[in-house]
């Protein structure tokens, strides 16, 4: 995410930096102090004519009866049903209102418990002052919070450095022995570092220690990683078998077949464009989302391209990638798109949230950056809706009956050379990832210190300046992964692959390791809690400071991609002592720890709504259950039915009540459980 980092000095106005290319950094907005609890501070990147409003619980019933929205794409309402609100908004042209989070009957009960059903987006003509309308609404007792919908702008359209034949000739060591038959694994020092990729500046073992971990597990398709980024190229030959597929949805359809509130969401959803069509070929797309996805789950041992951390093998499928697109070509996503993507991920099965974006660190140099949040309180109080959405993922992703209860959120720590991680990464409930080079030293751009919890390889182009030439100068020290074909412009076997760097590339290494550990838990039929996984991830990381030469500065050529070797700089490694989190992520040690974590999984009791369905994968709960056939005997079949569909059991509620049942495996194993069928209106009026 840092190539051509000279551009950062000219583009520091946007709130989020998505790290969306090897050289792009988003501009921060100049936030003022929080203006009390009821209204967020106005920022320079606030979207004109839009507000995010949280209503008081007392008017929830009025809003429900108004039927403001049922699913994404519905025509927004023109009245809220709340007289005082409508009186104010009738004074502005083009008044529209809709729920921030479309109704998904499967999760609506949780949504109401968390208060997310009270958030609405209000739209009006941009000829009216967004600040004035916000102030007027904040005066009402029926309104408890008003926030501005911010634009998530990308500062640069710079793309990755494509893999070329000349680059391979200069960088590849013929002495290297690859674990899988993927031809470019030898260039992926960040996965398997033998120290022989280039003459110097690589240390054997300065990787994520995944090679030994592959002996234990290579991934599991029940584990879903949501990539909040640019779109993921689902047709890429190294990724197409690793994509999450929403069964029952139809590509480019305008029908919401599964009732989750989003139509045509086959591989995820393009929240920036408001469409189920995931895209990667826009003029300003950089390939960043596809690059991130490749690190996590490119197909292993398929004879093409690269390897990945948790991409499985041809006979053992790996984890799945859900594309939650918050940037789309020239379209800049907003906070509204972001929070919808986060909740969507939790509600549709993702258990890891991969976030290579964040605000500018509050400790960043103000001469180069516009520092933002410095404390948990500052970030949370200024970004309440964002905080609530992430909190929803942490506590509602996964399942108390599945592999993991809760979700793990992984953020890039930021690339401002700052002695504190950016937010939201620095928040205690998230994993915050700093970046290292191929010799364990901190990457020259990485944030570190306060709020940083772990490190991972992220690449360091400026440090490896002497290797390669032209656009490939220093690329050997960066992260090699998948790219959309329109981004690379290369041909043949090299097309679709290239280099990027940054904490945004360190981040997916940690997301991949977390996903691999959860896959191993699934293999062992262990149930773990998200908090336990975070603790094990950090406690099993490897100390790296013993590899640093504290007496000699680390030399690098700043802005080498733009200025070549004319700007010699140095970093004092002593300043990074104890500041790179607990250490470097260690996949093998982490998987070993996971083996002893949690509790043994047992077949759960089933709760299903009248006329609703619940789907379970029975093999998750039986030792050696994969490949077996299953049947269910229900004591009272007037209450519920159960059908075996492929490797799944589908329960359908018929009438309210409770009954006993037994599930049996083809190998003779069985388990007793209870099925409860209940009405779901729950007095809330949302059905």
Image (cartoon, rainbow, N blue to C red):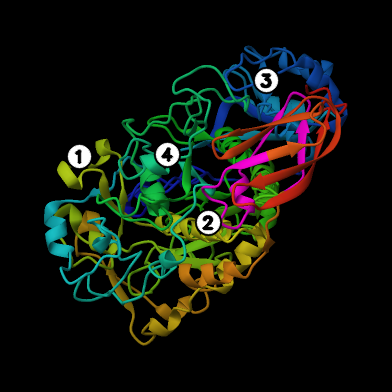
Asked if residue 469 shows in the view, the reply is: no
Which of pointers 2 and 1 indicates the residue nearer the eye? 2
The residue positioned 32% from the left and 31% from the top of the image is 281
Give neighbour class at mark 2: few <14, some 14-19, many 20+ (Cα, 10 Å). many
Closer-to-camera residue (89/326) = 326
Q: Distance between the Cα atoms at labels 3 and 4? A: 26 Å
Q: Position of residue 157 (x, y in %)?
A: 32, 40
The residue positioned 25% from the left and 62% from the top of the image is 187
Residue 218 is one of the magenta-drawn residues: no
- 546 w.r.t. 63: above or below: below
Q: Distance between the Cα atoms at labels 1 and 4? A: 18 Å
Residue 621 is one of the magenta-drawn residues: yes
Q: Position of residue 622 (x, y in %)?
A: 63, 54
Q: What numbered label is drawn on residue 519?
A: 2
Q: Distance between the Cα atoms at labels 4 and 2? A: 25 Å
The quadrant in which residue 490 appears is top left
User: Residue under circle 1?
Assistant: 489
Q: Residue furthest bottom?
A: 551
Give neighbour class at mark 4: few <14, some 14-19, many 20+ (Cα, 10 Å). many
User: Residue under circle 4?
Assistant: 230
The residue positioned 38% from the left and 74% from the top of the image is 440
Q: Is residue 80 left or right of residue 175?
A: right
In contact (CB < 8 Å): disc 3 and disc 4:
no
Q: Position of residue 356 (x, y in %)?
A: 47, 50
- 33 w.r.t. 193: above or below: above
Which numbered disc flags the more N-terminal residue, 1 or 4?
4
- In terms of secondary structure, where does tag 3 sit? loop
- In terms of secondary structure, where does tag 1 sit? loop
Segment tinted magenta in the rendering: 604-631
- 388 w.r.t. 76: above or below: below
- 324 w.r.t. 497: above or below: above
């Amino acid at each position: 995410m840092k190539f051509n980092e000279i551009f950062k000095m000219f583009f520091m106005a946007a709130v989020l930096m998505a790290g969306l290319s090897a050289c792009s950094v988003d501009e921060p907005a100049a936030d003022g102090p929080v203006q009390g609890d009821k209204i967020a501070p106005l920022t320079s990147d606030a979207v004109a004519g839009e507000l995010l409003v949280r209503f008081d619980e007392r008017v929830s019933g009025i809003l429900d009866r108004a039927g403001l929205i049922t699913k994404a794409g519905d025509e927004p309402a023109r009245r809220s049903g709340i007289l005082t609100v409508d009186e104010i908004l009738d004074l502005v042209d083009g008044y529209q209102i809709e729920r921030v989070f479309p109704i998904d009957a499967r999760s609506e009960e949780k949504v109401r418990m968390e208060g997310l059903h009270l958030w609405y987006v209000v739209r009006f003509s941009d000829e009216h002052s967004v600040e004035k309308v916000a102030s007027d609404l904040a005066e009402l007792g029926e309104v408890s919070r008003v926030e501005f919908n911010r634009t998530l702008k990308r500062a640069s359209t710079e793309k990755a450095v494509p893999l070329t034949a000349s680059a391979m000739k200069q960088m590849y060591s013929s002495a290297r022995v690859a674990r899988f038959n993927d031809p470019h694994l030898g260039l992926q020092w960040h996965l398997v570092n033998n120290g022989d990729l280039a003459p110097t500046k690589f240390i054997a073992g300065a990787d994520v220690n995944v090679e030994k971990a592959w002996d234990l597990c290579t991934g599991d398709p029940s584990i879903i990683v949501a990539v909040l980024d640019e779109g993921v190229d689902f047709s890429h030959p190294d990724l197409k078998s690793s994509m999450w597929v929403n069964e029952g949805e139809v590509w480019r359809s305008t029908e919401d077949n599964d009732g989750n509130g989003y139509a045509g969401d086959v591989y995820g959803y393009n929240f920036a464009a408001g469409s189920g069509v995931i895209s990667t070929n826009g003029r300003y797309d950089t390939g960043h989302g596809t690059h991130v996805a490749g690190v996590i789950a490119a197909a292993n041992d398929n004879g093409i391209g690269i390897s990945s951390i948790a991409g499985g093998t041809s006979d053992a499928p790996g984890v799945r990638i859900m594309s939650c697109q918050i940037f789309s070509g020239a379209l800049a996503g907003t906070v509204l798109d972001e929070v919808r993507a986060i909740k969507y991920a939790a509600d549709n099965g993702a258990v890891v949230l991969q976030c290579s974006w964040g605000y500018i660190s509050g400790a960043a140099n103000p001469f180069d950056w516009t520092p933002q949040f410095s404390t948990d309180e500052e970030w949370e109080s200024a970004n309440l809706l964002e905080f609530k959405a992430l909190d929803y993922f942490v506590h509602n992703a996964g399942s108390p009956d599945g592999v993991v209860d809760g979700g793990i959120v992984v953020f890039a720590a930021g690339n401002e050379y700052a002695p504190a991680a950016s937010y939201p990464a620095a928040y205690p409930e998230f994993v915050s990832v700093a970046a290292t080079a191929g010799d364990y030293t901190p990457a020259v751009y990485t944030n570190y210190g306060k709020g940083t919890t772990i490190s991972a390889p992220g690449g360091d182009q400026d440090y490896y300046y002497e290797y390669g030439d032209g656009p490939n100068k220093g690329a050997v020290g960066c992260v090699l992964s998948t790219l959309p074909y329109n981004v690379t412009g290369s041909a043949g076997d090299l097309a679709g692959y290239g280099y990027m760097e940054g904490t945004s590339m360190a981040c997916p290494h940690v997301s991949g390791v977390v996903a691999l550990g959860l896959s191993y838990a699934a293999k062992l039929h262990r149930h773990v809690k998200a908090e336990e996984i975070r603790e094990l991830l950090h406690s099993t990381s490897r100390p790296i400071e013993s590899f640093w030469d504290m007496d000699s500065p680390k030399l690098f050529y700043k802005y080498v991609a733009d200025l070549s070797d004319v700007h010699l700089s140095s970093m004092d490694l002593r300043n990074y002592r104890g500041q790179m989190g607990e250490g470097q992520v260690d996949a093998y040690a982490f998987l070993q720890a996971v083996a002893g974590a949690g509790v043994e999984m047992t077949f759960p009791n089933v709760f299903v709504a009248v006329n609703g369905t619940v789907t379970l994968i029975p093999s998750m709960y039986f030792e050696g259950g994969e490949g077996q056939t299953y049947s269910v005997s229900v004591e009272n079949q007037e209450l519920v039915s159960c059908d075996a569909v492929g490797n799944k059991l589908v329960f359908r509620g018929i009438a309210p009540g409770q009954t006993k049942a037994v599930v049996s495996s083809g190998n003779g194993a069985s388990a007793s459980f209870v099925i409860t069928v209940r009405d779901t209106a729950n007095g809330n009026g949302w059905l």
